[in-house]
Image (tube, rainbow, N blue to C red):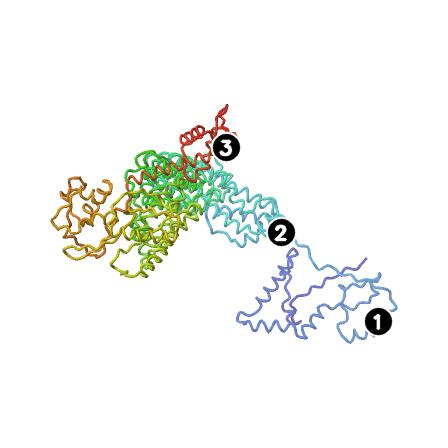
Amino acid sequence: MQPPSRTAKADPKSSPPSERKRKRPRASEETPRNQTVDSLFSGQQKQIGNDLPASTSRKRVKSETEQLSTPQSKLARAAMYSFSSRSPAANGNGVIDLTNGTPSSSPQARRASGASKGRGGINSHTGAKKLVVKNLKQNTGWNSKAYLERIREQLDAALSIIFNQGQDGFSKEDLYRGVENVCKQGGASTLFSRLESQCRQHVERDMRDALLEKASADNVTVLKAVLAEWATWKEQMATIRAIFFFLDRSYLLSSSKPTLSELTPQLFRDVIFNADSLKPKTIDGACDLVAGDRMQQPEIDQDLFRQAVDLFHDLQVYGAFFEPQFLGTTQQYVSEWSDNLIVEKTLPQYVSLAESFIATEMARCEEFALDTSTRRELLTLLEDHLVARKETDLTEYEPLAALLDNNAMSDLTALYALLDRRRLGDKLRPPFAKWVDETGTSIVFKQNEDDMVVQLLSLKRRLDATWKSAFAQNESIGHGLRESFEAFINKTKKGEATWGTDNTKVGEMIAKYVDQLLRGGAKAIPEVLTARRASSITAPNQAALQKAVEAAEENNEDQEVDEDAEINIQLDQVLDLFRFLHGKAVFEAFYKKDLARRLLMARSASADAERSMLARLKTECGAGFTQNLEQMFKDVELAREEMQSYKARLEDRVGYEKGKNVDLNVNILSSAAWPTYPHIPVVIPANVKRAIDDFELHYKSKHTGRKLDWKHALAHCQMRVKFDKGYKELVVSSFQAVVLLLFNGVKPDEHVTYSHILTETGLPEKEVKRTLQSLACAKLRPLTKHPKSKDIAPTDTFTINTTFDHPKFRIKINQVQLKETQEENKETHIRVAEDRNFECQAAVVRILKSRKTIGHQELVSETIKATVSRGVLAVADIKRNIERLIEKDYMEREEGGMYSYIA
């Protein structure tokens, strides 16, 4: 057996032996056995601190502490761990007990002892020694269960205070340390179970029961109460989470149990929100707030709805409960509201209110941070009820026609934008096309044809602006616009305007409008069609258009458009109308006649404009369309060269004096390229007759085998006339000149009878009346008619108007020569109709040659396709031409409604 050992206790803060003897505690002050090492050390530290005088400064304490590191302190420490000198052999089993006895405290003794042992310091006469170190730790008597129970009691008391909405009476730091110690001792699971149970009891007993008493109130009141309890519950759980933070971070995060932040909404949702009497009223209360806001009730609290949305998000019931209910109530409201609105309001009012309602609903979603799914579903719902289900009402013809008649661009833009929300903008094509067709047809078949082209151009400009601005250049609506425009512009109606033919009147009027532009230049352009004007004569809403025009003029007041540019712009616009024409033969016939007048009478305002229009027609219709027109220009150039050669020959003659003879200018025209003109007999004055005969001899001497056919109706001349107020130079037609020459040598008061003029001029009676009317009944009257009236009668007499006066020296009176007569108009229409019949017959023969045998319906359709470029033929006209070809033995009928070609 080992001898009993003694344990040596060392004071961690050693002091000199004298002070150690003074500070040794008495028997009654012995440390209890169950005291821990930390408390022991802390007690000793307190004792040291208490032994210091009260007036001892910090420096003094530091100096005394530093004394512990002196050599004396080292000696004291060595003395404290010294052992009594006992022979190692005293222990029978050879074990050295370091706790029993004290080795020699003298260094000399230790050196002597070491020297006696030899160099190795080991007694060679003894065996191996065994060292035994006894444990200095003493068993404590700490009771962990009692400590845990005390912590739980403190936590329960603190939770009771928190649930009663108190904040004092406990230390959060102490409670946090207690929770930490409990968790470190392995009591985290039990601690969370107690906490969850107490929280659930509080929510059920203190919160839910109080809310159930208010469940009979209205929805908004119940919602307010629930929100108040939720706010209180979040504050309480924030305090609880601060105390149990160590439990939350160290245990709950890594376990399958909910964290405290998850437990907060979970308990409230399971206990309070899911209560049968509270959940529907809470959700309906939020929906009632929205309904009140839609009704613009001033007492609605906007913050309350925002808090309700946050509650639904926090409880994670937004998508499951609130969103369906919110969308359901919205659908019911929008359905009733839109049905009543479409009946009570006009179309523009409905569109405006619908757009405003959609914008308000989307703004509410943004303001209260509703989910994107809610915004998407809400927008779909609104567009479905306000747009898709009202498609028929929004695309009715009558309200849309009213907007188009008033040129309400803003309303049309809003209407299209509303429909385009559901890609229904194309649905405006049928009513828009119908309006275009009806409006254009009324222009084409109106009684007053003088401004037809101006109105068509204005309508085209309006429609293009509407399509670009209001309808956002919708492709389908654009196709409908072009198809409708093409349909009405080619409509034909047999009547007086076309002399019973199927010719289109639009082609004739376009040709005459071009003639007006090329004769008058930029001054002939109507004000409504100039480049700096945007109004339309077909738009009744002139006030709004005038504002737009003034704004455009302010923006462009420094930008002047020259005349050539103006004419080119107008020609391009006319060409837009020309492209829609099917019956281009009518335009060609009238344009050719008007061009001939302009060239022969030198009435073109600009040669560049003439050639520019010819180039446009050639590009649009091909070289074959303009072949004769180009030949007309060549004939004029060749005639000018011919006259230069003739005048040079006259000057070479002996006895020729310039100025005394008639200054003759002749245009040699090829009959194939120019229009056909009727021969009108007239008695030519002798001096003019001599000049004509002389030129004819000259021309035949150069060109043998050619015959000249003089067209005096196309001639014009300049006459010098003396009136009382002086000489004037009159530009008149050849017929007018022949009539005026009859008044040479006649006294001012001498009357010339109608019958005398008819006999002397040799003109037909119709031409005589027409000529006298232009000289005596027009705005400029070199002759005076007796008696005064607008019509010419055989009993009328005429005298020279000696009082005739005009500010200009050179005056044009031959305007009647430029005007087309009804006979000429009728002749042109009839000739075009006959040419189209010939074209139809030629097309039928070509088709039969290639097909040999063909059915009736197929032959008619193929004929229409072949002749559509020159004008659409009526089916009745095609049948009539087929009958003529059968009579001429070009084709024959066969059984089954078939036709065959006869070679």
Q: Is residue 410 visible?
A: no
Q: Could you tell me how far apart the alpha carbons at marks 2 and 1 are, in whole angstroms?
A: 51 Å
- Furthest residue in direction front, as rendered: 654
Residue type pointed to by label 1: Gly
Looking at the image, which is closer to me, 259 or 697? Answer: 697
- Where does residue 746 sit, x and y in percent of width and height? 14, 50
Assess whether mark 1 and mark 2 are in contact (beta carbons under 8 angstroms). Answer: no
Q: Which residue has dot 2 on it?
A: 184
- Where does residue 254 sit, x and y in percent of width and height? 61, 48
Q: Could you tell me how far apart the alpha carbons at marks 1 and 3 are, in whole angstroms?
A: 142 Å
Q: Quadrant of residue 672?
A: top left
Q: Is 360 left or right of 119, judged from the image as shown?
A: left
Q: Nearer the viewer, mark 1 or mark 3?
A: 3
Residue type pointed to by label 2: Lys
Q: Is 151 left or right of 634, judged from the image as shown?
A: right
Mark 2 vs 1, N-terminal side: 1
Q: Which residue has dot 3 on it?
A: 848
Report the disc number at residue 120.
1
What secondary structure is marked by label 2? helix
For label 2, count other residues whose C-alpha is less than 10 Å away and answer few (under 14), some (14-19) or many (20+).
few
- Where does residue 45 sit, x and y in percent of width and height? 60, 64
Looking at the image, which is closer to me, 290 or 234? Answer: 290
Report the disc number at residue 642.
none
**In the depicted structure, whether residue 185 falls above or below residue 22:** above
Looking at the image, which is closer to me, 577 or 250? Answer: 577
Assess whether mark 3 and mark 2 are in contact (beta carbons under 8 angstroms). Answer: no
Q: Quadrant of residue 93?
A: bottom right
Q: Is 133 left or right of 758, judged from the image as shown?
A: right
For label 1, count other residues whose C-alpha is less than 10 Å away and answer few (under 14), some (14-19) or many (20+).
few
